Image (cartoon, rainbow, N blue to C red):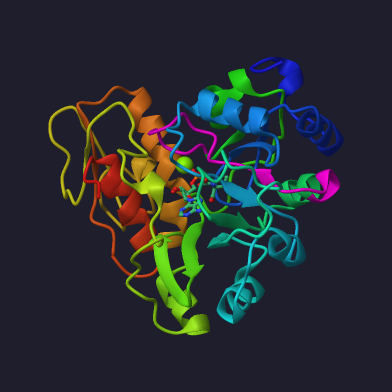
Amino acid sequence: MPGGENQRGATDAQAVEALACGGLVILPTETVYGLAADAADAQAVAAIFEAKGRPRFNPLIAHVADAAQAEAIAVFDARARALADAFWPGPLTIVAPVRDRLAVCDLARAGLDSVAVRVPGHVRARAVIAAFGRPVVAPSANRSGRPSPTTFDDAVEETGHAAADAVDGGPCAVGVESTVVSVLDGRIALLRPGSVTREEIEAVVGPLDEGGEGHRSPGRTTLHYAPDAPVRINVDRAGEGEILLGFGPGVGDPRWSLSPDGDLREAAANLFRRLREADRQKPAAIAVSPIPAHGLGEAINDRLKRAAGFVG
Ligand code: TXA
Ligand code: MG
């Protein structure tokens, strides 16, 4: 059971069995750990919202094994298909009109006419989903508002109490959640920056649109990713009792650095883990060095701004 020894290292078969019985499963992905359930099972999906303390207006991402399974539940136009071809399996979520309303139940979509779908890059996640045979919804396995878990232990600590099983897939390689784009009514908008960068997306489908009606992510309006300690961003030097998460050579204590070499990929992979580790020290505040705005820096700065309480 959750938190116990036997939970470490559930096999793929045990995870599939738990999903089929309506249970929740902690599932590793390449971005962050997820808390997974059968997307068609409203009762199991309700248990996810309960375990996370997540507002019901915030829809979940359906995880599928391949693009064919994605197109069975969502309606893709040519550009959605081009994005799927370019980035799947991998950390890109596509929001498109829903095709199969039963496969991803109303509660999972928060009643919307669109559905968010992705094919995760992590082999364990994809193996479990392929063996299960149907879409699996999986929000990040943190309690609502807190930093996403990027290690097995952090995931179990956050929502393990509600999970029937937990799959240990090692530390997450990417460390920030998937990029979310909406492809609706012939327009494409970036709803959540992530490790697939704006530049990489525009290289495939051309300039992104501003968004507008329907192109909105209901989950992005609340305080997010926040540790207990206050977070101060764009800071060069830590104040009294503060911990500085540095970026680049010679900035702060290297043990707390997001990336001593100033590497954005490394900083993304370290971000949530460092926030959690720093929080355990109960500092006066967690200060964070300026992070460049380009490429993966857009996703890192987005998470940091929200952790610091600048939302909107
Ligand atoms: O990397 C990830 O995407 C991770 C791993 C576990 O796959 N999952 C994840 O899920 O981050 P979650 O639930 O924490 O974030 C899903 C985001 C939310 O901001 C939600 O509002 C948005 O996707 N979303 C889901 N369905 C949507 C829809 N139909 N329209 C607009 N936004 C949607
Ligand atoms: Mg989340």
User: In the picture provided, is 308 more to the left or to the right than 261?
Assistant: left
Instruction: Say which of 59 and 142 sits in front.
Output: 59
Asked if one can make out residue 106 in the rendered structure from this viewpoint, the answer is yes
Identify the image quadrant of residue 276.
Answer: top left
Asked if one can make out residue 261 in the rendered structure from this viewpoint, the answer is no
Identify the image quadrant of residue 18.
Answer: top right
Quadrant for the N terminus, please: top right
Residue lying farthest to the left in this orientation: 240
Determine whether 112 is above or below 58 in the image: below
User: In the picture provided, is 32 more to the left or to the right than 102?
Assistant: left
Determine whether 240 is above or below 135 in the image: above
Identify the image quadrant of residue 219.
Answer: top left
Q: Position of residue 306 (x, y in %)?
A: 29, 45
User: In the picture provided, is 293 more to the left or to the right than 119?
Assistant: left
Instruction: Say which of 108 and 295 sits in front.
Output: 108
Q: Residue at x 33, y 66 (%)?
A: 212
Q: Is residue 159 magenta?
A: no
Q: Residue at x 53, y 40 (%)?
A: 140
Q: Position of residue 34 (x, y in %)?
A: 59, 39
Q: Residue at x 18, y 27 (%)?
A: 241
Q: Magenta stretch? A: 130-149
Determine whether 14 is above or below 184 in the image: above
